[in-house]
Amino acid sequence: MLLLALCVGAGEVLPLVGVAALCHEMGHFVFLLLFGVHVEGISFTGFGMEIRADTRYVSYGKDILCTLAGPAVNLVLAFLFARVSKDYLL
């Protein structure tokens, strides 16, 4: 994803892209831990990070919350950054 950001000319905001991607994955990770899911490992792939977790015994509701936690973190960050910069044009 970082390479894609560079290709589209996002060089000056690349650190923010990296922070946003890390926060996105941390959103998933925190919810997995909150629900007591065993995280087997974290690896870096060509498209970002991959969290391997044993979700066989997690309810569908908790699984959905873990899945939505990453994008939710990005929405909160987008709102906070827009508020700080006083620019709400996302």
Image: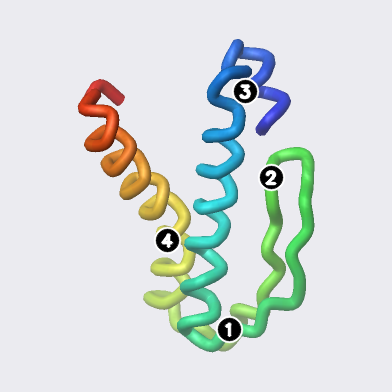
> Could you tell me the amino acid type at mark 4?
Ala
Q: Is residue 36 above or below residue 40?
A: below
Which residue is depicted at the point 47% across and 55% down?
70
> Could you tell me the amino acid type at mark 1?
Val
Q: Are marks 4 and 3 in contact (CB under 8 Å)?
A: no
Which mark is first along the chain, 1 or 4? 1
Which mark, by number, is residue 37? 1
Distance from Cα at disc 3 to Cα at disc 2: 12 Å
Which residue is depicted at the point 36% across and 53% down?
72
* Residue 67 point in image, percent of width and height: 47, 61
Q: What quarter of the picture does the C terminus occupy?
A: top left
Which mark is first along the chain, 2 or 4? 2
* Residue 19 point in image, percent of width and height: 55, 43
Secondary structure category for the residue under label 2 = strand
- Mark 3 lies on residue: 5
> Could you tell me the amino acid type at mark 2?
Gly
Distance from Cα at disc 4 to Cα at disc 2: 16 Å
- Mark 4 lies on residue: 69
Which mark is first along the chain, 3 or 4? 3
Q: Are marks 4 and 1 in contact (CB under 8 Å)?
A: no
Which mark is first along the chain, 2 or 1? 1
Residue 69 left/right relative to 3: left
Distance from Cα at disc 1 to Cα at disc 2: 21 Å
Q: Nearer the viewer, mark 3 or mark 1?
A: 3
Q: Are marks 3 and 1 in contact (CB under 8 Å)?
A: no
- Mark 2 lies on residue: 48
